[in-house]
């Protein structure tokens, strides 16, 4: 009897092709739309109804059963509240990482298994082999950075066929060949759960901010910000400090409500070779930390060679090269060649 696979159908082209490929491969496929967020924001209507309809149309085309799982309550608790709390504390979290850890590869997986599935599948650009997470063949689109907190047990029950494609154009060509209604649909932008809205517009709905000083490297006040919460390390745009050289954010003090900037791109507060990580997660157990690894400090950042040692609170990472704009709250993900070993949150 063929394995039952529940595919997370988001209404996008990647998950549509995922479902189609698994049908072709003989799996017993069910499409599932995860309703994680439905709230409209001023000027930004939530696209969930359109996405739901597109997902449903694909299921009809593929002649597979279709369901909707409503995870909105859990999503708000596990992802949105976490994100807001982190920003309030002056850090810059990554909601996509938390969404994968808590919702897609925990809540969705558990719900699907309880519902009769043997496995789940998603449209991620990544590959899985024997419970190990490997980079996608399409390194431009590789999404393993967002997946490093997924457990080995979850990976053993997950499929990611899109990871085999070398380009996005190949995925779209496959969607066209199959006549899928989502073949020409644009990729979604913005926060993972609220469509086109930016992080600032989102936070403005949940936090009250007061103006404060923007202070440059010599202690001179060069402007005023409208809330330190909105600024992140390395940021250049949105400071509204006119004239001369561009300013870069190098730090902030939430208690004083101050943002610190520099015009000096060589400012040592912008560059780091040494990182401390907390909330460390190893996918397949802690590796021998005697060898050297590669570390990615933000999505799409280049891999940098590193040596790693454990500490009482997590890990200390010594990078081979200085990296710009290391940001507390973001993740540093540890690779060994094409395999993701794990990672942690930058302190």
Image: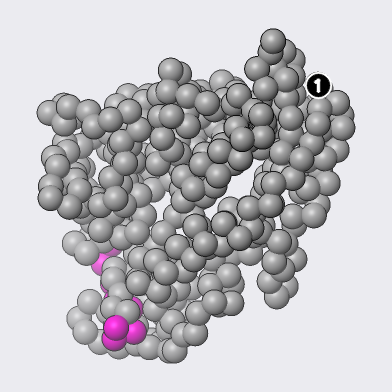
The segment highlighted magenta reads 255-265
- What's the colour scheme? one colour
Magenta stretch holds residue 259 = yes
**Residue sitting nearer the eye, 257 or 284:** 284
Point 74% across, 34% down: residue = 31
Point 47% across, 28% down: residue = 155
Q: Is residue 117 visible?
A: yes
Q: Eyeballing the image, is 261 above or below 125?
A: below
Q: Quadrant of residue 28?
A: top right
For label 1, the residue is 177
Say whether residue 247 is left or right of residue 267: right
Q: Quadrant of residue 174?
A: top right
Q: Eyeballing the image, is 104 above or below 199?
A: above
**Residue sitting nearer the eye, 95 or 251:** 95
Counting from the top left corner in percent of width and height, residue 190 is at 60, 57
Q: Eyeballing the image, is 72 above or below 286?
A: below
Counting from the top left corner in percent of width and height, residue 276 is at 20, 52
């Amino acid at each position: 009897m063929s394995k039952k696979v529940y595919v997370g159908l988001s209404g996008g082209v990647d998950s549509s092709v995922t479902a189609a490929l698994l049908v072709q491969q003989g799996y017993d496929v069910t499409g599932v739309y995860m309703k994680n967020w439905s709230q409209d924001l001023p000027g930004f209507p939530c696209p969930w109804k359109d996405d739901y309809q597109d997902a449903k149309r694909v299921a009809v085309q593929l002649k597979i059963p279709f369901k909707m799982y409503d995870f909105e309550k859990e999503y708000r608790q596990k992802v949105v509240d976490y994100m807001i709390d982190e920003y309030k504390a002056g850090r810059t979290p990554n909601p996509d990482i938390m969404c994968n850890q808590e919702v897609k590869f925990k809540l969705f997986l558990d719900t699907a298994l309880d519902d009769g599935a043997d496995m789940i599948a998603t449209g991620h650009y990544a590959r899985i082999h024997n419970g190990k997470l490997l980079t996608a063949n399409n390194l431009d689109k590789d999404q393993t950075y967002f997946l490093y907190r997924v457990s080995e047990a979850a990976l053993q029950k997950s499929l990611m066929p899109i990871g085999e494609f070398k380009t996005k154009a190949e995925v779209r060509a496959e969607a066209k060949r199959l006549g899928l209604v989502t073949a020409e649909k644009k990729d979604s932008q913005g926060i993972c759960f609220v469509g086109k809205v930016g992080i600032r517009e989102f936070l403005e709905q949940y936090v009250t901010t007061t103006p404060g000083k923007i202070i440059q490297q010599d202690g001179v006040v060069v402007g005023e910000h409208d809330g330190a919460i909105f600024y992140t390390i390395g940021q250049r745009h949105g400071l509204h400090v006119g004239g001369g050289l561009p300013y870069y954010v190098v730090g902030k003090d939430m208690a004083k409500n101050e943002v610190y900037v520099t015009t000096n791109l060589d400012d040592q507060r912008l560059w780091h070779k040494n990182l401390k990580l907390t909330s460390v997660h190893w996918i397949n157990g802690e590796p021998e930390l005697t060898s050297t690894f590669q570390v990615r400090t933000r999505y799409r950042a280049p891999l940098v060679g590193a040596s790693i040692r454990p500490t009482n609170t997590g890990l200390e990472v010594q990078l081979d090269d200085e990296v710009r704009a290391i940001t507390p709250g973001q993740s540093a993900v540890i690779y060994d060649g094409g395999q993701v070993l794990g990672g942690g949150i930058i302190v």
